[in-house]
Image (tube, helix red, strand yellow):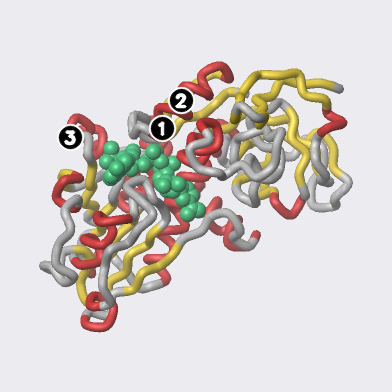
Amino acid sequence: MSTFRALRIDKGDGGQTVSTVDFDEADLMDGDVVVRVSHSTVNYKDGLAITGKSPVVRRFPMIPGIDFAGTVISSTSSEFAAGDGVILNGWGVGETHLGGYAEIARVPAGWLVPLPANMTPAEAMAIGTAGYTAMLCVMALERHGVTPERGPVLVTGASGGVGSVAVALLAKLGFDVVASTGRPEEAEYLKGLGASSIISRDELATPGKPLQKERFAGVVDSVGSVPLANAIAQTISGGAVAACGLAAGMDLPTSVAPFILRGVSLLGINSVTVPKPIRIEAWSRLARDLDRDKLKALTETIGFDDIVPTAKAILEGKVRGRVVVEI
Ligand code: NDP
């Protein structure tokens, strides 16, 4: 295949344009593994890239799509051989390196993770960067000693991609999961994923005192800003908060009080540059600890032509759970 279908972002004097093109394989960037991409996903960051709302794309033209799964076509690396199932998420793919919304990708072998034996490429992308990030958050809380016995865990942005997978994972691990959502109509959905109770997004939306009633042993936060500050203020002594997102804002209007008076820990999660052994551990944990029926329940599948409208919808908070793209 010398040309293949791809979504391409170009930037000119009039701003950014997005179009479906026949992309020449010779124009792919350096890498020792060529992959036939079968599935990608739409994450929040893909929404930012495609709409241009935040400058996440650093090179033009760019094929967006921050993650993909597929089968190796050819490899000059001893790590992978033709026919291997692989997953890619992070490393600036879809931002600085041509990404997943294309039939073919060429990437360094060091960025790829083998597809776990009992996982299909479609399931891997139902998890995608968002679900993988949820797993990193859960692993960070576990490392900090947050256990079901210590108390409930709060998940903010619960109906979103990170949130939905976090709810399902934590429930399977035996946690009492409190899901915070701005969409009360998704209460049954969230209970189906394993949330034991639902709170309104509004409860965390107004600036509050730096120390509030201790409620949560742990928090998985994908929204940042005032809700994160309130979540920190409601974390029990010695508890921990894994912060990975900014759906409500980049700021964090808090004080040191929860840290120095309650020993609360704020654990930062960056999924993009995680070393390979931890990536492999996270994907094998996802293969083991994520209930496949729940994964199915939180996933919608779309075609290539639906990527752009879905990218716009995710920034408006209108996407529930995870979206898989069949490439
Ligand atoms: P989604 O859009 O799927 O989920 C975000 C959710 O946040 C929404 O579904 C909504 O949930 C809630 N939300 C949206 N707007 C607001 C608001 N103004 N105030 C409060 N809550 C809001 O995105 P993803 O799950 O893909 O990503 C979530 C966040 O995590 C993003 O900011 C993303 O950039 C970040 N992220 C970071 C990574 C990292 O490496 N650190 C990796 C992956 C994601 P509800 O309707 O239930 O309230």
Locate the C terminus by quadrant: top right
Q: Amino acid at mark 3?
A: Pro
In the displayed image of the protein, which residue is found farthest to the left? 213
Q: Amino acid at mark 1?
A: Ile
Mark 1 lies within 8 Å of ligand 1 (Cβ measured) = yes
> Image quarter for residue 229?
bottom left
Mark 3 lies within 8 Å of ligand 1 (Cβ measured) = no
> Mark 1: few, some, or many residues within 10 Å (few <14, many ≥20)?
many
| Residue sitting nearer the eye, 200 or 32 | 200
Q: Amino acid at mark 2?
A: Thr
User: Which badge, 1 or 3, is on the more N-terminal residue?
Assistant: 3
What residue is shown with label 1?
314
**Marks 1,2: beta carbons within 8 A:** yes
Whole-percent x and y of residue 121?
A: 60, 34
Helix, strand or loop at label 2? It is helix
Helix, strand or loop at label 1? It is helix
254 versus 301 height, above or below: below
**Marks 1,3: beta carbons within 8 A:** no
